[in-house]
Image (cartoon, coloured by chain):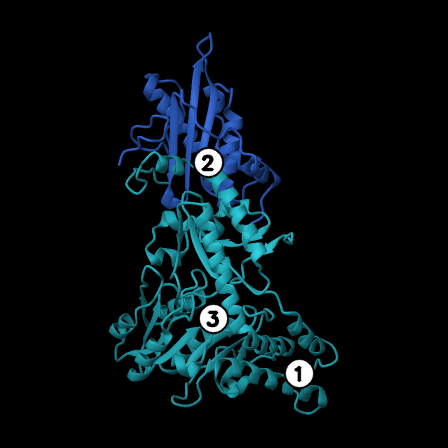
Amino acid sequence: MAVKLPIYMDHHATTPVAPEVFEAMRPYFLERFGNAASRNHAFGWAAESAVEAARSQIALLIGCKPVELVFTSGATESDNLAIKGVAQAYREKGTHIITSQIEHHAVLDSCKRLQKDGFQVTSLPVSRDGRVDPADVAKALTPKTILVSIMLANNEIGTVQPLAEIGRLCKERGVLFHSDAVQGVGKIPVNVDALGLDLMSLTAHKLYGPKGVGALYVRMGKPRVKLVAQMDGGGHEKGRRSGTLNVPGIVGFGKACELAGQLMAGEAARLTALRERLWAGIRARLDHAHLNGHPTLRLPGNLNVSFEYVEGESLLMSLKDVAVSSGSACTSASLEPSYVLKALGIGEALAHTSIRFGLGRGNTEEEVDYVCDRLAEQVTRLRAMSPLYEMAQDGVDLNTAQWSLH
Amino acid sequence: MLYSAQVLDHFDHPRNIGNLPDANGVGMVGAPASGDVLKLQLKIVADPDGTERIAEVKAKVFGCGSAIAATSLLTELIKGKTLAEAAQVKNRTIAAALGLPPMKRHCSGLAEEVLKAGIADYRQRTGTAGTAPAGVGVPEYKGSCGCGSSFTA
């Protein structure tokens, strides 16, 4: 069977809206367009009941109470609300926050903002395979620590963090625990109680829901988390996030969570097999391909590979009909390679050659085989042009060779 | 990012890629840690009137699409040219011809640097003073021999 081109293998960036999700949303754009805050007529009631049904669907997927969910515009807002909202609410108790070096910018930059405002932030390093060591969290905790924020699974390397262990440490010390869980929810089982989470950021568009809608889980009992709202206005979401609710988006988010709950076990197994097929296919065709991240403790659909001696952006450009992404500097505005890969300690040279594959619901074995073939062809073409490959073949140690800096 | 038709053409069909065993001027700039390394091999010959001319050129490049395109275009622009003519090929010449956005001027800058480095190496080997452009960005590297295998540790 011929594969349909182009092939989308960038599901960490976003996912398509599932047809069932789209159909569930449709009426809330059209005849059921009411404002969920309109308490005095049927249009408002229909919208409100749809929002509450969605809240329950999402709560079911992560094992929380519906009332513990605050709808937002997405995970960036959720991260900002969680971190800044907790920092401002607990400032009297302490001013120290612990996070990791490989968090999403929404977490890192929220912490940086707080640093400017007098908070102390500890950014924990990660191991070579991208894991935060719970022992490092334990060591970093001080009487002034009010919040620990560690992601569930990394968006670049897919490494799944030991949240349950970190959660236990936080609970023992009475420190709040937040996680940006956008890459993991709907892909791997997530239960806020099992992970010991007090706050968790979610987004719809990573799990086949629409863009522009997310949620923050905020624990309501043992402990009851206090939060200073970051958005002033009409006091929606029990005063935690003002702004008219994105009713169709929320309906889609709910439906997407319901579907994810049904499909997760099967999809996780299928995507893990596809990922292993992709990695085996790459290794069978090419040498000097290095896996970034943990060999097994990673998201089912994530594969991150450095194709040594080939700059990542040039490889992306060569794979014209395959959508993947790279940790190469040239794909960013900063000319700096991925800070996540740098944190692994793999070196900047290898970081520049990394490609992230994000497998998802639509991908097939045929597509994986096609991508393997194109990779082999294009990596070989680019290596033939690469002075580094030639030098390495000639036995030059590129790490100790002298380079001109620019 | 979106690429110009010129970048895509050079990227898909890079010109003058390979090695030049009888090169008499070799330049290499960049570093793997910076994400781009350009290597240029020149065969410079003197015309009967003594004018030095780039008779043959080959390049190798590790880098993003714009770096590959800039290297390819550089070889096209300097092949067969006198050294005085080649010296007119600048960062801005290449950036303009490829329609590179400002953040990619780094790539065309490296192309200018590698040309200077190649000519400087030729001057050094042949002991000619010439009128090579001022050595801004000429890399300090040792023992280039054209085969890429003798960069010192």
Q: Residue furthest top?
A: B48
Give the x, y percent position of residue A359.
Answer: 53, 61
Which label belongs to residue A184? 3
- Which one is closest to the eye, mark 2 or mark 1? 2
Image side of residue A217 versus residue A293, left or right: right
- Which one is closest to the eye, mark 3 or mark 1? 3
Q: Residue furthest right?
A: A31
Secondary structure beneath dot 3 equals: loop
| The hue in which chain B appears in the rendered picture of the protein | blue
Give the x, y percent position of residue A38.
Answer: 66, 87
Give the x, y percent position of residue A167.
Answer: 35, 79
Sooner in the amino-acid sequence: mark 3 or mark 2: 3
The Cα–Cα distance between marks 3 and 2, rounded to whole angstroms, is: 38 Å
The residue positioned 44% from the left and 43% from the top of the image is A310
Q: Is disc 2 in contact with disc 1, using a CB cutoff of under 8 Å?
A: no
Give the x, y percent position of residue B133.
Answer: 41, 25
Q: Residues within 10 Å of mark 1 (few under 14, many from 20)?
A: some
Which label belongs to residue A384? 2
| Residue annotated with mark 1 | A35
Secondary structure beneath dot 2 equals: helix
Q: Residues within 10 Å of mark 3 (few under 14, many from 20)?
A: many
